[in-house]
Every structure is written in structure tokens, then in C-alpha cells.
Image (cartoon, rainbow, N blue to C red):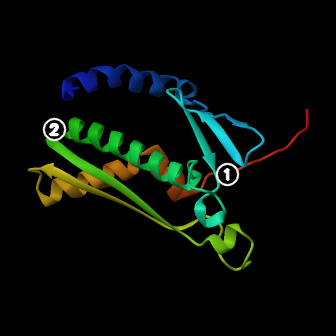
Amino acid sequence: MQRDELRAVQSPLKQRYKSDPDAARVTLAATGTLDERIACSVQTGRAVAEAGLHPATGGDGSLLCSGDMLLEALVACAGVTLRAVATSLGIDVASGTVRAEGDLDFRGTLGVDREAPVGFSAVRLSFALDTSADEEQLASLLNLTERYCVVYQTLANGPVLDSSVASH
């Protein structure tokens, strides 16, 4: 997709959302299925992903770790966002890689140490790009990618969470 094509597709959406803010509000959802194993199958829209225990918590490594999936979602979102921003700004990016790393202390999730955090204590996102962009353009590209990446902003700003349980 070229810059003009991207703008042509996004312009009517932006106008609609300006005139009707409710039209921009969308609830995304994911559904998983539990079975007799310590696993959860998630329909991704393209395939089923089975999540289970990480080897550091007793898994055998045959199932996906939800922590890896979170980082994969960040990589996917940041990569798509960077491409869209680069296109919008007219910055040529021939190719590149996106990498996310997250630090976990499994003592927290296993209840070994109540002081140990449950979840990632740090997440690092990096891009290695084949581009002729100068330092100022790269800084702008990174800033806008961070600003508009849904997963990045969700992690950075900690949304209000709610959970419930019911039997059926």
C-alpha cells in the first residue's frame, strides 16, 4: 500500500470518527477453550493456538506460553503500526525486524515469593530497519509508532481490568 492509498482508505474513517465518536469505539475480544489438559485453545481467526504452562512453571514446551503470545501481539501491532506510520510520513523502509523481550520472575506466578512480581517487570521493543531515514526521521517514526500502537499503549497505560467467574 502506498501513501496515497493509505490516506484514501483512512481519510473517510477519520472524518466519520470526528463526526461520530461512538463509531470509533470497538470492543475486541478473544475466546479460548479449556479441556482436560492445563491448556487453552484460542481461535485467532486464522488458526487455533493452544496455550499452556511455560516450562518454567511445569509445562513441557509443547504448548504456547501466553507471555510469548503477548510479546508476539506487541511485535505484530508495532510492526504494522511502524509500517503505516512510515508510509504516511513517506519514509522508505525496505525491510527490518521487530523484537520484543520481556522479563519475568516465575517465583511470583508460582507463589514462591509474595514479593516477586507476577507478570513482566520490563518489556523492551526494538526495531532494526533497512532504511535511509536520518536520525530525526527515525526518532519521529519511533515516537509515532509508540503513540499509535494499540498493544504498546495498552501495556504502557495499564487499562482498567475487570474479571468475573460463573458456573453453567
Is residue 21 shown left or right of residue 85? right
Q: Secondary structure at mark 1?
A: loop
Is residue 27 shown left or right of residue 161? left
Nearer to me, 81 or 31: 31
Residue of label 2? 90
Is disc 1 surrounded by few (<14), some (14 to 19) or many (20+) residues within 10 Å?
few
Instruction: Determine the residue positioned at 23% across, 36% down.
Output: 88
CA–CA distance in space, label 2 to label 1: 36 Å
The x and y percentages for residue 68 are 51, 53
Residue of label 1? 160
The x and y percentages for residue 35 are 75, 38
Nearer to me, 103 or 64: 64
Above or below 24: residue 91: below
Instruction: Determine the residue positioned at 88% across, 39% down.
Output: 166
Q: Secondary structure at mark 2?
A: loop
Above or below 66: residue 19: above
Nearer to me, 118 or 2: 118
Q: Amino acid at mark 2?
A: Gly
Q: Earlier in the sequence, mark 2 or mark 1?
A: 2
The x and y percentages for residue 112 are 73, 77
Quarter of the image with the N terminus is top left
Above or below 18: residue 111: below
Q: Amino acid at mark 1?
A: Val
Is disc 2 surrounded by few (<14), some (14 to 19) or many (20+) residues within 10 Å?
few
In the displayed orientation, state which residue is furthest to the left.
132
Is residue 74 shown left or right of residue 64? left
Is residue 1 shown left or right of residue 147? left
